[in-house]
Image (tube, grey):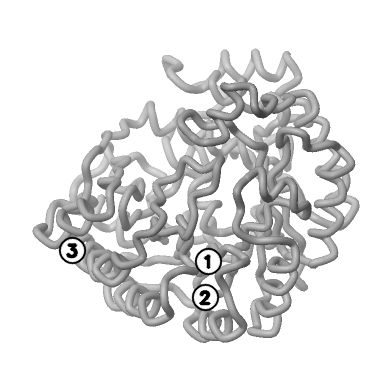
Amino acid sequence: MNAGETPGSSGLYHKLNLVKQLLPFSSVQPYAILFIMISIPYSVYIHIPFCRHRCGYCDFNTYAGKEDLIPPYVSALCREIELVSRSVGQRLPVHTIFFGGGTPSLLPIYGLQQILFTLHDCFDIQPNPEITLEANPGTVSPTYLAELHELGISRLSLGMQSAHETELNLLERQHNLEDVERAVDWARRAGFKNLNLDLIYGLPHQTLDSWLHTLKIALTLAPEHLSLYSLTIEHGTPLHRKVQNGTLPAPDDDLSADMYETAIEQLETAGFAHYEISNFAIRDQNGHIMACEHNLQYWRNLPYLGFGAGAHGFAGNYRLSNVLRIPSYIQHVQNGKVLAFPFSPATTSHTRIDQNTEMQETMMVGLRLTREGVSKRIFLKRFEKPLEIVFRNEIKTMTQNGLLEWAGEGGDTLRLTRRGLLLGNQVFMQFIGSSS
């Protein structure tokens, strides 16, 4: 794939070229904003905050032992979806849906069915939508996976994390390698043709050899997609406390970098395209990279709606987040009413995004796309300002330092260099708070 091409097969960019979403909302009249809102394909994120056990490294908004709240939570989710959709006055087009958590696979089939029915009732779900569900390997069965597939879930993301029992125990994962292998087999038998495996590297006591073994085992499972995450010791987690009191060593940054570079080489040799800093995918029979279309929405800084406790969204020039606690979320939604789009009764914080901030954020997330990067052409259409002028100084500094490069047809694409991949956070910070 050439650097100027876009991964995936949704045709998202072709649609974007047909509408004026690429103009800043602040520069158009209210009727034009409404036209834009109902012309852009949106993404929907559904947060499922339930877990059987909270892993030692996790700082997500999740709660263990609260399964009795699942039925009222699902009802509240459906009501929040209805209230937000009614605030638009039109059926927004939606092309991806992502059930994240937590452990979405703890929801019974009838709960997922209720949520999907509500989404189809409230939004204009596009043909062949990408619908992803995250699952822990130890929480699924052949029957459950078959029913998921029948519901229209088209993409399954399994939290494998490691092939080693000692590493899984360190992370406090509630599964083993056999659970992963069974879940993959059952998923294939159920008809899933788009499967992701999550892996974590940079663990205390993890060696390069043990990491390579995990990669090898993951590849034998033949997933279409792999997400590789460097372990971050989050403040307040059990893992953080163990590092703080000396029970565990802190992650070795140099070793983590070696693991990352080795993984890139191994996966590219195995035919995976490295399309985002942490993500790799094979090509389908038409040659398209099987990227996660939902996450591409985030990395292209395009609008998405977040539903559920602690969910985040970006729409109508606002970034929003919902109340965290499950009982509070249920109460807020039950007592709520229709508000101005994109607000929900569960919204507890919001920030208006002006054009300058949106340009900076577009650079920060867009440069995570290792092939696609940020296009001068698309940036100009979206903001009516030249990328190479707006961020002249930042681009000059980063290209001179060998961290960014111009690529693609006619040098249209600004993207990270191989060296820049290892120093991505330093690059991204150059664009945040700039005086553009």
Q: Position of residue 334 (x, y in %)?
A: 13, 62
**Quadrant of the drawing holding the C terminus:** top left
Q: Position of residue 53 (x, y in %)?
A: 49, 55
Specify whether 403 is left or right of 380: right
Specify whether 41 is left or right of 193: left
Label 3 crowd bin: few (<14), some (14–19), many (20+), radius 10 Å: many
Kindly identify which numbered label has been placed on residue 132: 1
The residue shown at (25%, 46%) is: 323
Q: Is residue 357 visible?
A: yes
Residue type at mark 3 is Leu
Say which label, 2 or 1, has the lower sequence index.
1
Q: CA distance from mark 2 to mark 1?
A: 6 Å
The residue shown at (67%, 72%) is: 183
What kind of element bears circle 2?
Answer: loop
Q: Which residue is mark 2?
A: 153
Residue type at mark 2 is Ile
Kindly indicate the quadrant of the structure image that contains residue 291.
bottom right
Specify whether 298 is left or right of 418: left
Where is 319 relative to 131, above or below?
Answer: above
Nearer-the-camera pick, 152 or 9: 152
Specify whether 296 is left or right of 178: left
Q: Are marks 2 and 1 in contact (CB under 8 Å)?
A: yes
Nearer-the-camera pick, 433 or 204: 204
**Quadrant of the drawing holding the N terminus:** bottom right
Where is 349 relative to 194, above or below?
Answer: above
Q: Which residue is mark 3?
A: 83
What kind of element bears circle 3?
Answer: helix
